[in-house]
Image: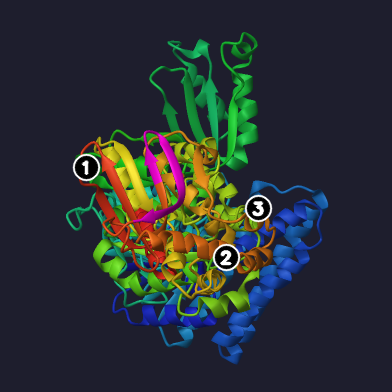
Amino acid sequence: MIVSKFGGTSVGSAKNINKVVQIIANKKKKSAVIVSALSGVTNLLIKASEKAVNGDKDYIDIIKEIQEKHTSVIEELLNESDQIICKDYVLQNLHKLKDTLNGVFLLNDLSDKSASRIISIGEILSSYIIAKAMKRQGLNVSLKDSRELIKTNSDYNNAQINYKDTYTNIQNFFLKNSSDIVVLPGFIASDEKRDTTTLGRGGSDFTAAIIANAVNAEILEIWTDVSGMFTANPKLVKQAKPIKRISYQEAMELSHFGAKVIYPPTIQPVLDKNIPIVIKNTLAPDEDGTFISKNKNGNRSTVKGISHIDNIALLTLEGNGMVGVPGISHRLFEALSNENINIKFITQASSEHSICIAIDVSEYDIAKKAVDKQFEFEILQHKVNPIIVDKDLAIIALVGDNMKSHQGISGKMFSELGDNNVNIRAIAQGSTEKNISAVIAKRDVKKALNTLHAVFFEDHIKQINLFIVGIGNVGGKLLEQINQQKEYLLDEQHLNLRVIAIANSKKMLFDQDGINLNDWNTQLINKGEKSNLDDFYKNIIKLNLRNSVFIDNTANEIVPKYYADYLKQSISVVACNKIACSSSYDDYKNLKYLSRKYHAQFLFETNVGAGLPIIDTLNNLISSGDQITEIQAVLSGSLNFIFNNFIAGSSFYEIVKRAGEEGYTEPDPRIDLSGVDVMRKILILMRESGNKLELENIANESFLPESSLKADSVNDFLETLKKESDHFEKLRMEAENKGCRLKYVAEYKNGKAKVGLQHIAKDHSFYNLDGKDNIVLFYTKRYIDQPLIIKGAGAGADVTASGIFGDIIRTGNK
Ligand code: ADP
Ligand code: ASP
Ligand code: MG
């Protein structure tokens, strides 16, 4: 015999009930079919009883809603004569329900007995309708009320089974029953006095397991809305996959820790008889689902699944007077057990100075009172502190039979969570090592599940979530490059780059599934909201995605003010913006410190020489123990472009204007021409070489005339360049007369740095520096006579974007 249980979603609509009928019709064996209430109906019944007991008349509307739900299913599912019978049956039961709820409303009292009677209605109605639907299809079916078979104590809403009577009743019934199919309501039972009891939320699974045991079923099928027990809750982890085979113990651990797909007590009755369970999807019956049995030798992967329990409160009992005193934990547990409070998690440090326990948050108030009362005397004597309660927590757990034979699983679990700023409040690992669990903040659950899932199940593919501010020249190119390289990175480096948000000064766009980069511009225009850096930050924090990277492609002064906040959330920062690294030394150092402290990267390769690997090389030299003795460099692609084009007969003003138009200068060309940009760059190189310096410590002899230096707008500045053409022509001639070229050079030696225009002779390595190229000569303790030279394009959107891209990849490879 086969026992099949269909959950609420499987019987939520006429369409799905038809699927159920089809699945059963295809079976060639005798079946017991256990059904839940139509999806959502148990919740509505609970809501109605809460309203009634709180004196809210709206419970009447809820009864109507329940009636409409059933009526519409009946009308779609059945022929006219069956419709009349079924509607009448529904009406009769809802009348009784209304009477009970009226009583609750008038008395302002909801006893457990009434509550149980109220919530049993869902299964009573669904089983009746489904049996009718099967009959209409010509199946040989009978309906049996489970309350006549399953006997319990009078703990109405979480009734305990009287197995002896129950098994005898079921066996006797099936011995006599000759129909091919018996439909039974799940969840409901009765006590000695024949009053209705219920088996706890999700209890239809349990009903089915009890029947499976009693009839010695060959298999117990649990039909639901997902294709099996998944490696994690598929509603929260998109990459989760059904587990093909799993042991009873593993299934039990996963369900205890929140894998709602199977109600935890379900396993024991079938385990006792070694009856396998298969979890299948009513909506996709051809998929394999999950096979649960004693047999463990299917898949030997260590971690089988990750689950979580929401709504946890952590109670911490601590105090100096607890150390070495026997009986403290006994009294703690006794106080909780007297209040019927279920403990989900316990840890105690070996110092015995504190005990932590996790319970359902709804019970924390009663728990606190009970424990504080229990230790009233010790609290008065300051031997024990009043119990500390933390709320808004959750438990996540790794589950697997084979974890015990593998080292390093918990290490991996906690380091990955730490790297993603998931704070761990308490840890527990059973000695059987089937389960490693941790208490974390509720808001971190999705991130934690996804992070751990990626580590333990996803072939080590690392998802990196990008939040990009600045999508003009450089940012636009970056998006283009990411789009082009996405597949390659996934295949070759196992990195999954997703752009979650983009923003310019006007608009910002978020898509937590990743923005489609083929038409980001149109999406930004059509769907983007008004841009605001505060909101941008808040949205990122709210999304709380693992491996998040904030990217600043702007030259804006305000954006860097947020870097510290991002780093503190373990969000890496990649900046082509130089402001942060060239502002005060303390700020720069602080960002580096935060990056270390919060395991987030702070990378800014493009601050110097665009995409050239200058900072990376410098860092490698320093890490390997080298020391920088001297740097000579042409670091301004813009100035190089300008002076290379400033030949006899040309106008300095025109060239500067053109450089601006072609994107070779900063939006404000004064930053380039005043030398400030180069000062910032050499400052960053010096700081990265280990010097504590400020921008003012860098000597700058400007080549600009007084009037240009004083200009207080970009236009005024450009005008002065026009007016002062003689000044610039003189500069040019002086160099030409000596057979030299003009280059804007940055130099660092003996702890000092300067920037300025120099006459470069033919034999110097800077002489032939073309276009907008940069060059850096590093003289070090190891590169003494011949410097280490890095040379190439030092400006331009494409190369800058590729430098940022490189930093993004570095965050992924850490
Ligand atoms: P039913 O109404 O069929 O009893 P439930 O809602 O009780 O269905 O259980 C199925 C749900 O369990 C799934 O829709 C899914 O959201 C949730 N779930 C949580 N964890 C897991 C998991 N590890 N594998 C599969 N489903 C899970
Ligand atoms: N209808 C009950 C509930 O929603 C029992 C079940 O579906 O398993 O909890
Ligand atoms: Mg269920």
| First in sequence: mark 3 vs mark 1 | 3
Q: Is residue 495 above or below residue 351?
A: below
The part of the chain drawn in magenta is 747-760
Q: In which quarter of the image is residue 383?
A: top right
Asked whether 156 or 434 is in front, the reply is 434
Q: How far apart are marks 1 and 2 (CA)?
A: 42 Å
Q: Mark 3 points at which residue?
A: 115
Asked whether 189 or 441 is in front, the reply is 441
Q: Is residue 430 above or below residue 384?
A: below
- Is label 1 in contact with label 2 (beta carbons under 8 Å)? no
Q: In which quarter of the image is ligand 1?
A: bottom left
Residue 277: give x, y in percent of width and height: 31, 61
- Is label 3 in contact with label 1 (beta carbons under 8 Å)? no
Q: Name the residue under label 2.
A: 726
Asked if the magenta segment contains residue 70, the reply would be: no
In front of the other: label 1 or label 2? 2
Residue 461: give x, y in percent of width and height: 31, 60
Asked whether 693 or 532 is in front, the reply is 693
Task: Tell me, yes or no, if residue 610 can be seen here.
Answer: no
Residue 145 left/right relative to 689: right
